[in-house]
Image (spheres, rainbow, N blue to C red):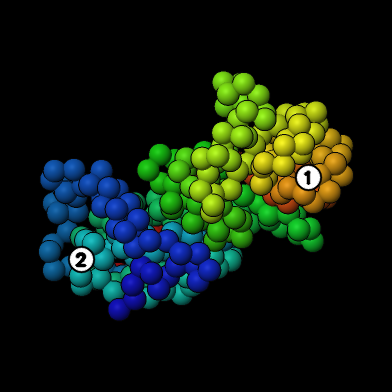
Amino acid sequence: MITPTSLLHPDAFLSPLAIDDAVHRALDEDLGRAGDITSFATIPEATKAQAVLVARQSGVIAGLPLALATLQKLSTDIEVRAHIRDAARVGRGQQVLTISGPARAVLTAERTALNFVGRLSGVATLTADYVARAEGTKMRICCTRKTTPGLRALEKYAVRCGGGFNHRYGLDDAILIKDNHIAVAGGIRPVLERARARAGHLVKIEIEVDTLAQLRDVLATDLADAVLLDNMDIATLREAVRMTEGRLELEASGGVTLDSIAAIAATGVDYASSGALTHSAPNFDCALDIEM
């Protein structure tokens, strides 16, 4: 029997605990107190069904481990044959999973499984579009913390399925000094000195700047590891790369769209981060077709 972890993108780990937690919460939300009263009222217990999860558009698949975990949570008698695994490119009409087992369990799992695959494949597909437009450059496409509350681990995994990279997961794994931190702390040098004094030896420090003058101030301190260039136009990004001369990693952020990503990549920055990868990804169209 296949397991959820066997369907993960081979180069993008997702904790089995995160899968179990997400599936449990999603099913609890859908089943409520009485379960799927429609299926229990209309489908005899012994009825078997076969179904196929089909992609209705082309793109990059993600979320199959969660779909499988959803099905297996509802019945240990469900059998699933996977035709692909996460991060695979699919065409419209391509079969993704073949499912057989108790009809009640298949019908009850349908919407939750499709929600996972639709949402995460949408993120993966949009990310892949961004990555394709930056092809041939050194720049990496990164997501942000603008994720659906409670689904961050899943959505950041989907970004990796699409060929992107993750920015920090939360507030606890890297120091990112924003404009408000600078204002409250009293300036660029004071905020960087405090951050450097407190940071562990494995913790990177990134600071956001809005102008080249601020970038010059950061370079003068020699205390940051990376600089986030916020809402800078293409000419200013190029000048920032020239000024830095490789001393710091540079990340473009703000105004990073499908239309602008190629030009941003051509400036020579190391990273571009876009909240759109997760907060604005359209749902991937997929369906569960019953074949009795």
SS under mark 1: helix
Proximity of marks 2 and 1: CB atoms separated by less than 8 Å: no
Task: Name the residue nearer the viewer: 237 or 180.
Answer: 180
Q: Tell me which amino acid carries mark 1.
A: Ile
**Pointer 2 local density, CA inside 10 Å: few below 14, some 14–19, many at least 20:** some
Whether residue 41 is visible here, answered yes or no, is yes
Q: Is residue 270 left or right of residue 19?
A: right
**Residue that appears at 73% across and 47% down:** 248
**Pointer 1 local density, CA inside 10 Å: few below 14, some 14–19, many at least 20:** many
SS under mark 2: loop
Image coords of residue 291 (percent x, y): 34, 68
Q: Is residue 140 left or right of residue 284?
A: right
Q: Which residue is mark 2?
A: 75
Q: Tell me which amino acid carries mark 2.
A: Ser
For the residues labelled 2 and 1, the Cα–Cα distance comes to 49 Å
User: How many numbered tags mark residues here?
Assistant: 2
